[in-house]
Amino acid sequence: MAAIEDDTEAAARPLKIPPLDFIACAVGVTGLIALTIVTIRWPQYLSPSQSIGAFIISCVIPFAASWREAVRDGRLPAMPNGTPKHDHITGTGFITLAFVIGVIVGLASWAATSTDANRTITQEWGIGVVFGLAIAFVIAALAPYTEYLKTNRQADAQNGFWTFAGRLFLRPFGLVLSFFDSILVFAVAGSAGASQAHLIARYFFLFGVLIPCGMIGYFLPAPWGLVPVVWGFVVAISISRRWSWVEDDRDLYMLNRRYTGSHLRIGFGQDLRDEALLSFMSMFFLVPLALRQAFGWSQSAGVELFSVTGVGIPSLLDWIGFYGTELAKAVPFVDWAEIYHVEGQARIHADTAFGRHLIFATRVLVDLVFLAALLQALSISARNSKQMDLFLAGTMDRLDPFLEPREFRKLLRKPAGGQWEIHPDRMAAFPKYDPLRLAELSDAQHYPISIAAKALRRRDGSDDSVKFHEQLIERAFQKKKNPDAIEEVLTAIRMTNVPIEIEDFDRIRIELNGRRAMNSLRETIMKMIAAAADTPERWAALKSALTGETEHDHGRGPEYVRDHIAPVRRTALNAVKDAALAGSDAAVSVIRSVHETDPSGQIKREAGEILIQLAKA
């Protein structure tokens, strides 16, 4: 098949200045690399405190820039009580987290304070654990059905009490946790490159942070080296949290089929699965560094943390080996080492209470964090495979945001020195795709997969303008309007390149008038009306937006019909200006009306300037 020519899409794009967060990440990584070189090669030039100061500055620069960019993009609030609200962790979530942590800390404290003779789990304890867990599962299973047993008055009273108690005592804790979680996702993860669009940039910035954290943490004396190591932990956890948010958005997209909108917290600019898993991989080396630093700190403070056998100071490999033996015994949820009485043979031993606490914390980290990340990665792979099976079978007509571009690119090929062209065999075998989504993908910003989207539209005859208009009217006149759903259909209509039903568009604009969330939609509608062919319907729509004169006012008067925002009226005014310059007396009359009655002083002035221009003509 001949190559598909598209001069508009293939046109060279002008060079753009990199965004602030990219520049800040580059500056931060450069500072960390330079500090690493100085720390290793010329340690005498910087004291440990000066090195930590330089490290903090190198981390704060991209952190602050990422925070600022998140505020500018509307991802984080500019003020504490601003929007968007981050309250995704509820008071119940806080209680659950606090209970789990309390149980873990309580068990560790009991085990550490008990003597070896008394550190036993008796049979009575075992019976209590079994029955306690059984009761917990029964409560969880029957809790939803207890609502059927209450009267409405009892349910309202109980719900009112718990709502009041939750808002008064628990909600503040949930808000605090939500705030810190949001900072991890946007500011910390962003400072490590997680918000960058290009894969190479994300990898470079991520390892440009984690590797210097490990190197500086190794060469700085204790306890100074703990600072970069702990920051490496925080970065890894923040990448994981951002990945979790992306996956939540992915699930929401497959449920409501909206690629953009306020329901998405991160969007689909990056698939962070690989970055999250590699971040956790780095923790297998950061943890031994942390143990080494903690051991050095304890020695300088005269506190016994670990005991060491053999001759000489333990090397980094000794600490890695020690941590590895603990991991081997801590294979998640399979306590094989205790059952078979297997003990580690490393040089280092955790014989003290503090040492046991530290090792216990690392094992909890493996069970609760590493395992969760691994299971999530495996479940995503299984879900992607199942999704592809359903798509190929024709059960689903959309793919998720990360599978979609990969599968669409398979429909294209680019010969050496040539242009993108359709792969005919793959195109013929590709299942029918959702027409609305194909219209979105046909936009030039999705080049080159826009070529495949347009080819699929031609193959399936999915440019059904009538159907799209019907969907637009249905969504615009729903009682609960979704601006993202309306915008999706407008995009589909715009991509069909067929004449629009102007009278319907004017009715829809009036229906959306006065709703702040619909302002951008009304601008789009008016631009499409202004760009349409000159017909009586187009003239009536322009006039209604400027003066409020229309047959669709439903008896509410001109103030109800005339558009409430100046950008829409300005678009209509410029369209009427062309008719006035062409000699239309009706257009001149409308411009005079705007000059006399428009609520915006700026629009009045613009109308007056047009009248002056007409007088001179």
Image (cartoon, rainbow, N blue to C red):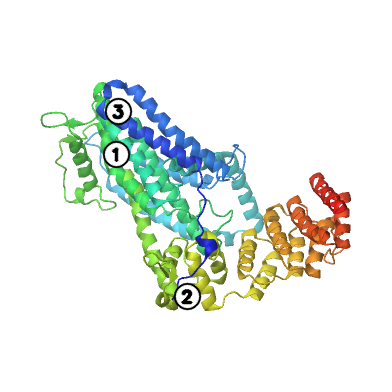
Q: Is residue 97 visible?
A: yes
Query: Observer-nearest residue: 596 or 307?
Result: 596
Decide which of tag 1 and tag 2 comes sooner along the chain. 1
Q: Which is more N-terminal, label 1 or label 3?
A: 3
The residue to which callout 1 is attached is: 286
Foreground of the two, 490 or 608: 608
Q: Quadrant of residue 415?
A: bottom left
Q: Nearer the viewer, mark 3 or mark 1?
A: 3
- The residue that appears at 78% across and 53% down in the rendered structure is 564
Q: Earlier in the sequence, mark 3 or mark 2?
A: 3
- Measured from the top left, where is residue 377 in percent x and y? 36, 57
The correct choice, above or below, for 145 with respect to 338 in the image is below
SS category of the residue bearing label 3:
helix
Return the residue at label 3. 38
Q: Tell me which residue sits at (78%, 66%) in the image.
A: 538
Identify which residue, 373 or 576, lies in the foreground: 576
Vertical placement of residue 464 versus 90, above or below: below
* CA separation in Å, label 3 and label 2: 59 Å
* Relative side of 364 to 174, left or right: left
Task: Return the x and y of residue 112 as percentages of the image width and height.
Answer: 28, 34
For the N terminus, the quadrant is bottom left
Mark 2 lies on residue:
395
Q: Identity of the amino acid at label 3?
A: Val
Q: Quadrant of residue 573?
A: bottom right
Q: CA distance from mark 3 to mark 1?
A: 21 Å
- What residue type is disc 2 on? Thr
Say which element carries label 1: helix
